Image (cartoon, grey):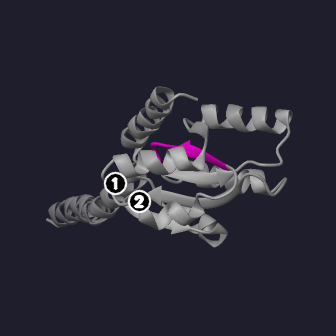
Amino acid sequence: MKREDKNALIESLKATIEEYNQFYITDLSGLDAQQTFELRKKCFEKGIKLVVVKNTYFKKALERTGRDYSGIYNALKENSAVMFCEVANVPGKLIQELNKKSDKPKFKAAFLAESAFIGENQLDVVASLKSKEELIGDIVMLLQSPMKKVLGQLQSGKHLLGGLVKTLSERE
């Protein structure tokens, strides 16, 4: 491969890294053609961009972004595929789902929300992370809860006062 082609590939990876800002590094070795097809299909359905990369090119692309990804460089060994995503926990859940049937894809590392998660023991952690939209929904629900309680009490008080006024008016 010519140097210009290598630089173009590295720049393409850099652009993808900057576009998504979140990614998982996995090992797909040992998957046959059918399993790889099914994995790519599921990734497409869930909005995950799956790219098989050469570790040295991916490391150079990470270095060219100007951000500190040094925490995940140790995971760039053997075969690597990168899952780029918009929602941080979607690839983690997909990997967990697929690992119920077999041990592939193997989770190596993830870079999510400015944090590095390294090692298979971190898969449960990254899969259980809530997305930005889920967190906003939880906050809105928590903010609405006291308001709903107050409104409910005011509504019940309205009926109580109306009944009390009616009872008093009937006495005379």
| Residue projecting furthest to the front | 2
Does label 1 or label 2 sit earlier along the sequence?
2
Query: What kind of residue is marked 1?
Result: Ile
Badge 1 marks a residue whose secondary structure is helix
Query: What residue is rendered at 57% in x and 44% in y?
Result: 83
Q: Which of the 4 image quarters holds residue 154? A: bottom left
Q: What are the residue bounds of the magenta stretch?
A: 80-87
For residue 136, which numbered disc appears in the image? 1
- Which residue is more in the foreground, 117 or 52? 52
**Quadrant of the image containing the N terminus:** top right
Above or below, comparing residue 75 to residue 37 in the picture: below
- Which residue is more in the foreground, 65 or 25? 65
> Where's residue 120, x and y in %?
66, 67
Above or below, comparing residue 30 to residue 165 in the picture: above
Query: What residue is rendered at 55% in x and 66% in y?
Result: 74
Query: What residue is rendered at 35% in x and 46% in y?
Result: 64
In the picture, measured across the screen, residue 85 lies left or right of residue 100, that is: left
For residue 156, which numbered disc appears in the image? none
Visible in this render: residue 22?
no
> Where's residue 16, x and y in %?
43, 37
- Which residue is more in the foreground, 107 or 147? 107
> Where's residue 163, x and y in %?
25, 61
In the picture, measured across the screen, residue 81 lies left or right of residue 20, that is: right
Visible in this render: residue 158?
yes
Query: What kind of residue is marked 2?
Result: Tyr
Q: Which of the 4 image quarters holds residue 126? A: bottom right
- Which residue is more in the foreground, 21 or 8? 8
Q: Sort mark 1 into few (<14), some (14-19) or many (20+) by Cα contacts within 10 Å.
A: few
Mark 1 → mark 2, Cα distance in angstroms = 28 Å
| Residue bearing mark 2 | 69
- Would you say residue 155 sits in the magenta stretch? no
Main secondary structure type of the part rendered in magenta: strand
